[in-house]
Image: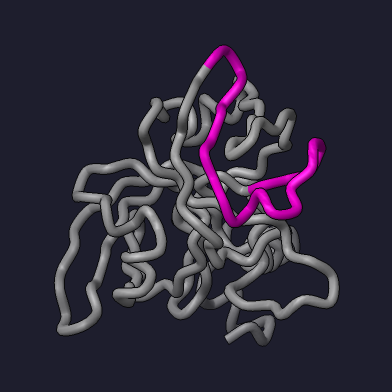
């Protein structure tokens, strides 16, 4: 499990079949073969270590359902090791299981902050709630003004500097993982409604709002 707090930005050095080699520094301090690591929000398993790089294998499913299939040598990627038991917990619960791929819709400066809007596929948009959490390329962010197929996030300068988000532009693809707690609540309520969908009347009648 991850937190969505990016530890460093690495760089892809090589792609060969399923192998993805990434240049890194901070995450290598205690990384071992077999460990999990989040690469742009996708949970991968370390298969080899070579000096200042590690290798992870990307399955056909991950290539098809995430942005990892688009990576090429020289591309920057967000890296995070799993949360350690007993460590401080920031961000939110991030599993590294991407729900869908979205796109940057717009970027609007608001003083020191910037408001970003993203297009989200239905498999992500259904779980979005105001002030809820979402992982974008593995970055834990807070949702504002969700709509049927878009949502916004307010981004601080530090996030732009310390992650790959600062290099994104409208139209760029990103990995999206909805908050697992939100997904579980959604499924629970959907099951209670007999799979007929979730209306505001249903939520009100059952004490959810």
Image vertical order of residue 66 relative to residue 109, above or below: above
Q: Nearer the viewer, residue 73 or 138?
A: 73
- Picture coordinates of residue 177 (x, y %)? 54, 53
**The N terminus is located in which quarter?**
bottom right
The residue at the point 68 percent across, 81 percent down is: 206
What's drawn in magenta, residue-wise?
A: 16-37
Residue at the top extreme, as displayed: 17
Check residue 14 for magenta coloring.
no
Q: Nearer the viewer, residue 146 or 106?
A: 106
- Picture coordinates of residue 43 (x, y %)? 66, 44
Question: Quadrant of the rendered structure where residue 33 is?
Answer: top right
The residue at the point 61 percent across, 48 percent down is: 38
Describe residue 127's horizontal placement relative to residue 27 as left or right: left
Describe residue 36's horizontal placement relative to residue 140 as left or right: right
Image vertical order of residue 32 relative to residue 138, above or below: above
- Picture coordinates of residue 86 (x, y %)? 84, 77
**Residue 186 visible in the picture:** no
Q: Nearer the viewer, residue 142 or 55?
A: 55
């Amino acid at each position: 499990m991850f937190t969505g707090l990016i530890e460093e930005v690495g760089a892809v050095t090589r792609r060969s079949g399923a192998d993805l080699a990434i240049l890194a520094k901070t995450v290598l301090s205690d990384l071992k073969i077999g460990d999990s690591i989040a690469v742009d929000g996708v949970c991968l398993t370390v298969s080899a270590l070579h000096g200042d790089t590690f290798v992870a294998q990307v399955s056909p499913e991950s290539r098809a359902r995430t942005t990892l299939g688009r990576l090429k040598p020289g591309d920057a990627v967000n890296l995070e090791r799993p949360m350690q038991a007993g460590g401080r917990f920031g961000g939110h619960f991030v599993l590294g299981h991407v729900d869908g791929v979205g796109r940057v819709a717009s970027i609007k400066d608001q003083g020191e902050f910037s408001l970003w809007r993203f297009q989200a596929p239905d498999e992500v948009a259904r779980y979005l709630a105001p002030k809820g959490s979402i992982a974008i390329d593995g970055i834990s962010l807070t949702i504002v003004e969700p709509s049927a197929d878009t949502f916004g996030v307010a981004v601080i300068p530090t996030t732009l500097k310390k992650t790959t988000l600062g290099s994104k532009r409208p139209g760029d693809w990103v990995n999206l993982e909805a908050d697992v707690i939100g997904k579980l609540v959604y499924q629970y309520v959907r099951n209670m409604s007999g799979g007929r969908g979730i209306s505001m009347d249903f939520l009100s009648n059952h004490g959810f709002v």
